[in-house]
Image (cartoon, rainbow, N blue to C red):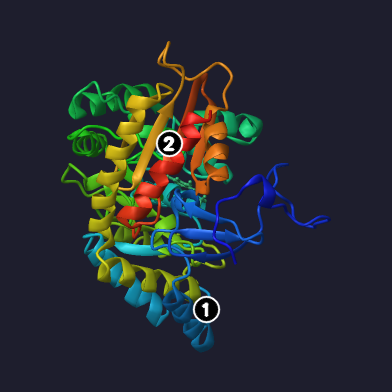
């Protein structure tokens, strides 16, 4: 198999006819193999996975030991239902995960994807208050922009008008008050203080939780608040009897160079932490939440059960994948690698920013990095969106996968590219990413 970037001569194509319901009308290459930071298609093209898919493949592709752990688990115990059994692999994983995240008394609730995990957090927050007799609390404050998932509850919580508008008739808008996005021109404390007005307007006695992405993902290219923000946010939540949920589906599990991004600069322990993506790093569908002992005791020790559940919650084969991935992350020191390679990539991206004026800003933490794109004359996204998609297409033609985002979020146009290769990327591979991006930016 040749190992080249796609050229006009070997452009891949999807099979026709096909019974697959593709996401869009674009042509999808037929991916056949993954190894390290690279993916290969049926035409022999090689792609450097510069975004780990959608910030998922934290340990890289083709790690046989994860597959072997999953196969061994499937052979010994493939499935039990969470209403009937626990399993050794789930018990072991919950303990190791709590230690890795330094959330020692927290309880792990396992599901299959990030949207299920944020839905679970929303419902858990609601039930927690109801168990305490505080039945009037149901609203969840989130930010504009934000992305918490595609299922109806998670989407209702998300501050992404364009993705929500079609489904608004199915949502109760007043249940999801929105606060503004982090403003790095303010001190972290002053920035967080803006929550107060949102709580007061919503009626603080009706609010169950505040949910934020500590480093923003798909909706706003790796934007992060300044030091002090999360601590103050949590303090205000406490003052009003509201829970703080950190949605670390994208930012957690080492991606930002620390186990939890909410603790990048602050000493804070949210009430609920939501995880996904990097948990099993794409080897199996696995996501979940960590809930404080206080929440667990109130709910399970109260009415006796969390009134919620999915058939595949805590699936032993997915959890076995998570356990094996966590072992690799720790054994290979990938949290530190994310910091080192992230710093290298950030420097390279800033160099590109000095050459290409359409790169308005470069930002991020660890290996969750973003390029904000737009019109250098106005410092804003172009009226006609799509620059990010064009750059992503040009990068892909040079053998580099990136994660573009463009369009309007509640009236404000945005164009950005998320970059987040596997955490075990080498220094040389980072340089290869930068060279491909250089070419792509030069061609668009
Ligand atoms: N929360 C955050 C912060 C995310 O970035 C995502 C996905 O991008 C989700 C939730 C939803 O996760 P999933 O796509 O696995 O349902």
Answer yes or no: is residue 276 visible. no
CB contact under 8 Å: marks 1 and 2: no
Q: 241 or 292: nearer the eye?
A: 292
Q: Can residue 443 be seen?
A: yes
Query: CA–CA distance between discs 1 and 2?
Result: 50 Å
Under circle 1, the secondary element is loop
Q: Which label was assigned to residue 438?
A: 2
Say few, some or many: other residues with alpha carbon within 10 Å of mark 2 (under 14 / 14 to 19 / 20 or more). Answer: some
Task: Count residues near mark 1 (Cα–Cα under 10 Å), then give few for <14, some for 14-19, many for 20+.
Answer: some
Mark nearer the N terminus (1 vs 2): 1
The residue where tag 1 is placed is 80
Instruction: In the rendered view, tell whether residue 196 sits above or below residue 267.
Output: above
Q: Residue furthest bottom?
A: 76
Name the residue at 53% across, 82% down: 74
Identify the residue at image location x=42%, y=78%.
Answer: 65
The reply to whether the residue tagged 1 has its Cβ within 8 angstroms of ligand 1 is no
The location of residue 377, given as percent across then percent down, is 42, 11
């Amino acid at each position: 198999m040749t190992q080249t970037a796609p050229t006009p001569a070997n452009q891949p194509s999807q099979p026709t006819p096909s019974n697959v319901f593709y996401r869009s009308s674009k042509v999808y290459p037929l991916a056949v193999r993954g190894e390290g930071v690279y993916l290969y298609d049926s035409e022999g093209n090689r792609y450097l996975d510069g975004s780990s898919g959608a910030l998922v493949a934290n340990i890289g592709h083709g790690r046989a030991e994860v597959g072997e752990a999953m196969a061994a688990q499937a052979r010994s115990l493939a499935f039990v239902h969470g209403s009937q059994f626990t399993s050794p692999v789930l018990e072991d994983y919950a303990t190791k995960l709590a230690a890795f995240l330094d959330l020692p008394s927290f309880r792990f609730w396992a599901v299959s994807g990030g949207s299920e995990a944020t839905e679970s957090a929303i419902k858990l927050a609601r039930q927690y208050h109801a168990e305490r007799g505080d039945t009037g609390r149901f609203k969840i404050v989130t930010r504009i922009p934000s992305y918490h998932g595609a299922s109806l509850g998670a989407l209702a919580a998300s501050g992404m008008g364009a993705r929500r508008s079609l489904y608004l008739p199915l949502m109760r808008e007043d249940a999801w008050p929105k606060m503004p996005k982090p403003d790095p021109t303010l001190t972290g404390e002053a920035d967080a203080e803006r929550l107060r007005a949102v709580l007061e307007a919503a009626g603080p006695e009706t609010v169950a939780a505040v949910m934020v992405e500590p480093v923003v993902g798909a909706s706003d290219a790796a934007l992060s608040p300044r030091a002090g923000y999360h601590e103050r946010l949590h303090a205000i939540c406490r003052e009003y009897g509201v829970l703080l949920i950190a949605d670390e589906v994208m930012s957690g599990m080492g991606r930002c160079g620390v186990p939890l991004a909410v603790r990048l600069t602050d000493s804070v322990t949210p009430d609920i932490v939501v995880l996904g993506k990097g948990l099993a790093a794409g080897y199996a569908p696995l996501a979940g939440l960590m809930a404080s002992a206080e929440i667990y005791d109130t709910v399970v020790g109260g009415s006796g059960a969390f009134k919620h559940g999915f058939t595949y919650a805590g699936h032993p084969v997915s959890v076995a994948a998570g356990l094996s991935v966590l072992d690799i992350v720790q054994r290979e020191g990938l949290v530190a690698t994310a910091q080192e390679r992230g710093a290298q990539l950030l420097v390279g991206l800033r160099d590109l920013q000095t050459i290409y004026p359409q790169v308005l800003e470069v930002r991020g933490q660890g290996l969750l990095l973003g390029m904000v794109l737009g019109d250098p004359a106005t410092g804003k996204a172009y009226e006609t969106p799509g620059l990010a998609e064009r750059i992503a297409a040009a990068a892909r033609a040079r053998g580099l996968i990136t994660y573009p985002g463009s369009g309007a979020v509640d009236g404000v146009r945005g164009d950005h590219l998320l970059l987040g290769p596997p955490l075990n990327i080498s220094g040389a591979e980072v340089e290869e990413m930068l060279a491909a991006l250089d070419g792509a930016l030069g061609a668009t």
